[in-house]
Amino acid sequence: MTAEPKIDKSQIRHAATVIVLRDRWTSPRILMGQRGAKAVFMPNKFVFPGGAVDPGDYHVPLAGALPEGCAARISEDSAPDMAHALSVAAIRELFEETGQVLGQPGEWDTDVPDDWTDFAATGHMPHASALQFVFRAITPPGRPRRFDARFFLVDADTLVTDPDDFSAASDELSHLQWVGLDDVRSFDMPFITEVVLSEVQKRAQSVEPPASVPFFKNNEEENLFLRLRGHRPTD
């Protein structure tokens, strides 16, 4: 077996974050957890499930792909295969950190990667068609870890697991809970999470993907607020 390339965590890494929305028509709530006190990145903060893209995420098969419009917006300023890898990472991180399965019943027709064995044991293939790409942000310079994070919104009704059962979750996030959108700002959250929440609140009762996606592009040269509209590049 070929060893995975070593990851340089000092560089900006691609990442996927999942915002699971529940009871959107009545009393909208989102799934959050608290990072550990010893975490290098954002200790003690309440966050959405998510994490960095792994090299293997580019090769994991999906039973259903990310919606075409969302994939086009990701590809507007990214490599062509990034939409697939981010979708896979989003589903993997959601399962690892919360135990929740976003998938479709089915058997894997390829070897199951080590970090997908528990997911595959549930009898499901990862399925990304319910994910909506809603936000992108790059961690500002000077932080101990930097990520180019894409945020995906998904309705809790599309989960195949009990949304109140976190027994299969890892210990990376504690105090997993459903937080009302009216109460969430009383929690200790990173600044960017608060910004993303404003977008979620606007979209709480909209089932269609956004026409454009906010992009906070923080780099060493300048801080830009852009919008990704999914326009395909022209020759």
Image (spheres, rainbow, N blue to C red):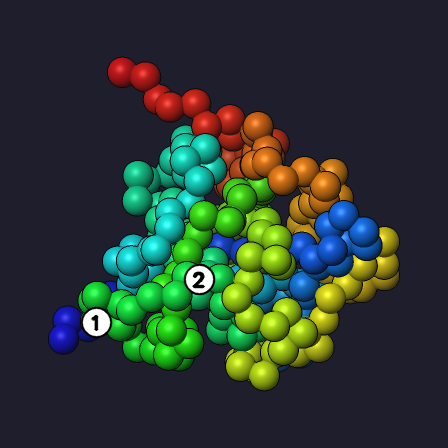
Disc 2 is placed on an element classified as strand
Q: CA distance from mark 1 to mark 2?
A: 17 Å
Give the residue at x 57% y 28%.
Answer: 211
Measured from the top left, where is residue 174 in percent x and y? 66, 78
Disc 1 is placed on an element classified as loop
Measured from the top left, where is residue 51 in percent x and y? 49, 63
Q: Which residue is mark 2?
A: 103
Give the residue at x 35% y 22%.
Answer: 233
Q: Is residue 69 above or below residue 20?
A: above
Report crowding for label 2: few under 14, some 14 to 19, many 20 or more residues within 10 A (C-alpha).
Answer: many
Verify CB contact (< 8 Å) between mark 1 and mark 2: no
Q: Which residue is mark 1?
A: 111
Report crowding for label 1: few under 14, some 14 to 19, many 20 or more residues within 10 A (C-alpha).
Answer: few
Closest to the observer, 98 or 5: 98
Question: Dividing the image into 4 quarters, which one contains the N terminus?
Answer: bottom left
Q: Is residue 170 above or below residue 155?
A: below
Give the residue at x 49% y 73%.
Answer: 96
Residue 139 visible to an observer of this rendering: no
As drawn, the residue found furthest toward the front would be 105
Question: Dividing the image into 4 quarters, which one contains the C terminus?
Answer: top left
Please state if 217 lies on the left or on the right of 11 as rendered. right
